[in-house]
Image: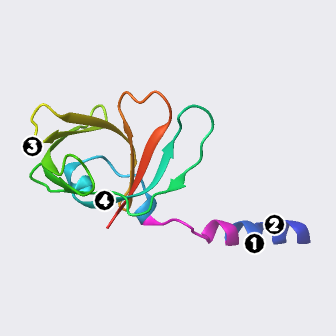
Amino acid sequence: MRKLIILFVASIFLSSCSSSDDSLLIVDLTVDSLSGTWKMTDAYVSPGGETTWQTVENGREYTFSPNGNFNATQDECPTGTYNLDLDENTLSFTCTNDTESMRSFRVVSITESEMEISYIGCIEACIYRYRKQ
């Protein structure tokens, strides 16, 4: 009987503990969830074979405005427009300086504070992690 009481109390105690962090909850990909400045912090890129997440120092930044415009640092496409395909979870950029230049990413995941994207068409692992600033 004593063991049952201890087990019952322990289960109540453990179930009341919460380690959730609302900033890590996955949110829907929307203009609102994307709006703001995102800085690349990590990369998971494989030229073939196993790989691990690597820290990116001074990673590029993207600032997405609710009106569909973006600005970027350390990128050959510093300004332009973006489009979200909510059915496919894709993010596409069109550069202002070259209307023929377009890039598309699959949004792997997005939370209030973190986003992971991958180039569409990438054969090997190529995922980039961004943190909201």
- Foreground label between 4 and 3: 3
Q: Is residue 65 above or below residue 45?
A: below
Q: Badge 3: how crowded within 10 Å, few (<14), some, or many (20+)?
A: few
Q: Which residue in the protein does label 1 denote?
A: 9
Mark 1 and mark 3: Cα distance apart in space: 65 Å
**What residue lies at 47% left-to-right and 49% top-to-bottom?**
43
Mark identifier at residue 7: 2
Q: Badge 1: how crowded within 10 Å, few (<14), some, or many (20+)?
A: few
Q: Which residue in the protein does label 4 denote?
A: 38
Mark 2 and mark 4: Cα distance apart in space: 46 Å
**What residue lies at 90% left-to-right and 72% top-to-bottom?**
2
Mark 2 and mark 1: Cα distance apart in space: 6 Å
Please provide the residue range marked out in magenta.
13-22
Mark 2 and mark 3: Cα distance apart in space: 66 Å
Decide which of tag 2 and tag 4 comes sooner along the chain: 2
Q: Are marks 4 and 3 in contact (CB under 8 Å)?
A: no
Q: Badge 2: how crowded within 10 Å, few (<14), some, or many (20+)?
A: few
Examine the image and state in which quarter residue 117 appears.
top left
Q: Which residue in the protein does label 3 denote?
A: 97
Classify the position of the N terminus by image quarter: bottom right
Q: Position of residue 59 (x, y in %)?
A: 37, 59
Q: Position of residue 124 (x, y in %)?
A: 50, 31
Q: Position of residue 90 (x, y in %)?
A: 29, 36
Q: In the rendered structure, which amino acid carries the disc numbered 3?
A: Asn
Q: Is residue 132 above or below residue 95?
A: below
